Amino acid sequence: MPCSLSELNALSQDAFVATLGEIFEKTPAIAAAAYSQRPFLSVEALHQAMVAVVEADSLESQLALLQAHPDLGSRAAMAEASVQEQAGAGLDRLTPEEYSRFHQLNQAYTQQFGFPFIIAVRSHTKASILAAFEERLQNSRETELQTALQEVFKIARFRLDAAVRESA
């Protein structure tokens, strides 16, 4: 069950990180750094504080955050939130042909950019994800780095909306 903002604002740093540490895939340091910005008056303010942490991070830290994300449609172990998000887009039910196509695109993308393809799958279908793969493979590395970070921020907002409610 989601916690309220007032409950969240009252947590110790350890409890805050335990509650929100997976909002950004396998990167609890973001929640730890955002903790000092309490109290949060809205989920949007909390999201913006966490985004600001990422934006202020070094390129190496941003790349590590991107690299923490699983390949789409993979059968590798991943965070529970990722499992649910990918299942919502049908990526847990790929045909062998679709699985092969996702695998090929994941490999091409990672080879070209150095991090996995990231998209907020909650607002997509298998077909729209495949189209986005094709389109984004045409981007420069700098453009794609910024696009991937924006998608991470969307994913984090979806996860925050599920984890935190505005009122008590």
Image (cartoon, grey):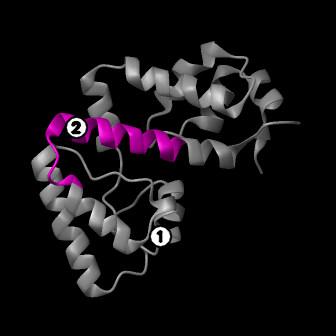
Name the secondary structure under disc 2.
Answer: helix
Please, what is the three-letter code of the amino acid marked with disc 2? Thr
Nearer the viewer's eye, disc 2 or disc 1? 2
Instruction: Look at the picture and state if 159 lies above or below 75.
Output: above
| Residue 64 in the figure: left or right of residue 26 | left
Which range of residues does the magenta coloring cover? 136-156
| Residue 111 in the figure: left or right of residue 75 | left
In the figure, residue 128 lies in which quadrant? bottom left
- Tell me which residue sits at (36%, 20%) in the image: 57
- Tell me which residue sits at (53%, 27%) in the image: 50
Q: Which of marks 2 and 1 is nearer the N terminus?
A: 1
Distance in Å between CA atoms under marks 2 and 1: 25 Å
Residue ID for mark 1? 89
Instruction: Look at the picture and state if 69 lies above or below 91.
Output: above
Tell me the number on the disc at residue 143.
Answer: 2
Relative image position of residue 90 (x, y in whole percent) = 46, 75
- Tell me which residue sits at (42%, 81%) in the image: 93
The residue lying toward the viewer, choosing from 141 and 165, is 141
Name the secondary structure under disc 1.
Answer: loop
The residue lying toward the viewer, choosing from 37 and 75, is 37
